[in-house]
Image (cartoon, coloured by chain):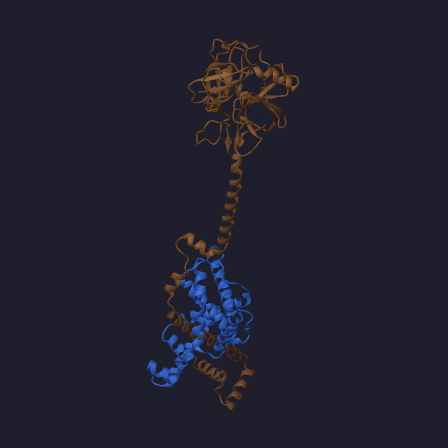
Chain colours: A brown, B blue
Amino acid sequence: MRNDLELDAIIEDYLLGKLNPQETEAFEQLRRSDAAVDHKVVSHKVFLHTMEEYAQQLLLKEQLDSIHSEIDVDSLVAQVAPHPSRIVQLWRKHKSAIAVAASFIVLSFVSIYSIQHNSQQTDKYVQLSNQVTNAIKTQNNLIRKINTNNNTVPNKAGNPGRYGGTGFAISTNGYILTNLHVINGADSIYVQNSKGESFKVKAVYTDTQYDMAILKVSDKNFSYLSSLPYTIKRSSSSIGENVYTLGYPKDDAVLGEGYVSSKNGFIGDTTQYQVAIPVNPGNSGGPLLDNNGNLVGIISGKPDQTEGAAFAIKSKYILEAMRAIPQDSLGKKLVANKKSLLSGLKRTQQIEKLQDYVFMIKVY
Amino acid sequence: MVNNGLKSSVTTDREFILGILNNSGDTLNKLYKTHFAMVLQFILNNNGDEDDAKDVYQEAIIVLYNKVKQGDFELSSKLKTYIYSVCRRIWLKKLTQNSKKTGNITDYEDVFEVEEDVEHHEEKDAAFVKMQSALEHLGEPCKTIIQDFYIHNLSMQDICEKFGYTNTDNAKTQKYKCLQRLKKIFFQH
């Protein structure tokens, strides 16, 4: 034990270079001759080196700790710590990305707004009325206001109508179909045929959903019509199908020709077609017929900024409206899918036959 | 302006390195304070607290310090980037060890490859921890005697007086006894 300690002391002195040359020489002799001593020297060398490094690191760490203690960590933490609010945290992390996204969104809104702003013009719906329409309504009626100051407008009733539209017979005994908006709020309603004769009518059925009204002539002077020249079309019409309408935008019947331009109406309204026919206030309630004289729809309105387009209620809703009338009271009524009398005739002949069944509606 | 800023930054980095080589306490102080906030932010935003930040940052400084001292540090980038990269590597390893999620590390600086340096440091640190625990196992008064002699470089005369040995030979004998035990513990592990 004692010897071991002395040996350790000598080894350490040897490694630290504290031995004098003679002692060094003697020790190196010993080291060469005794492998166990040599091993001890090597391991102690490793140990001393580790100890030295340990000492260095320890001192460095102490130094760093003392520097660290000079730093006001708390205030730094407050500055750079993740904010308790996730939103602020996200903001800090993704400032630039958020900025890009935000500008993109702003840009999108601007373009969407401008697109909408443009398309809004086509979205408004005009019912083509010359009535002073309800300001809230987005669609204007195709009702013609009869100028009360204009004395040249002949009127057999002697009482100028406030506004008007068009209607057409759906039976021979005086049932007339028109738009509800034409007669809405009326005190009294008259219809005037192509010969200029006026008859008093009563509204017997109104349908707010499809904007339809059925009128019944109550005037005793009314003579029954001969059988209806047109039939009703049950199936829906295709785009491009030629259609025409006869209406009373003025005191004489006016023909409008065109084609079905879209299967849906105002903002995708599936109860209507869009047709390319120039229509004017007063056309509301007019019949829309195809070349074979089948009733395709009822002109009911137009987009307020698009010229040359109109909307027409699809014919199948006419059938629905007609079911609301007691069937036996209709007499010889409008029938579906029967060959119409207009089929195969020239347009001029068609109009000639048709005009007796299309009426101007005058509302007081 | 930009050129000037760049120059002054590089000069400062150079100064830091020269300071470390010259054992300048001031330089170390300045260096430490310059980049701590950056590392603190990084750690706090990646599942750590300020103590983690301190540990990681000090390790990084030690890595830099040792590398500079060994003379194989080439200033190929900003010191800031180097320190950040080392911290990031160390912190990622710690997170993995504690099996915390490491999926999305939030970065605040550029990063470059420091794997070798960090591994080298880990070897050194293992030796450090080994010595530390050996000293802890040694117990008093041996631990203090050894520390005084080898770390604080006290002479045997000082140690003799401090511990009240009758003469330096007794103190020496005691020191070698302690050293023997310490070596035994150290090489055992």
Residue A254 picture location, percent across and down: 58, 22
Residue B151 picture location, percent across and down: 42, 78
| Quadrant hosting residue A261 | top right
Q: Residue A156 versus residue B92: which sits nearer the camera?
A: A156
Residue A282 drawn above or below residue A116: above
| Quadrant hosting residue A352 | top right
Residue A305 drawn above or below residue B40: above
Residue A275 picture location, percent across and down: 58, 28
Residue A284 picture location, percent across and down: 52, 24
Residue drawn at (53%, 84%) of the image: A30
Q: In the image as oriented, which residue stretches furthest toward the left? A: B164
Q: Can see residue B189?
A: no
Residue drawn at (39%, 80%) of the image: B174
Residue A174 drawn above or below residue A110: above
Q: Is residue A24 left or right of residue B182?
A: right
Q: In the image as oriented, which residue stretches furthest toward the front? A: A151
Q: Can see residue B11?
A: yes
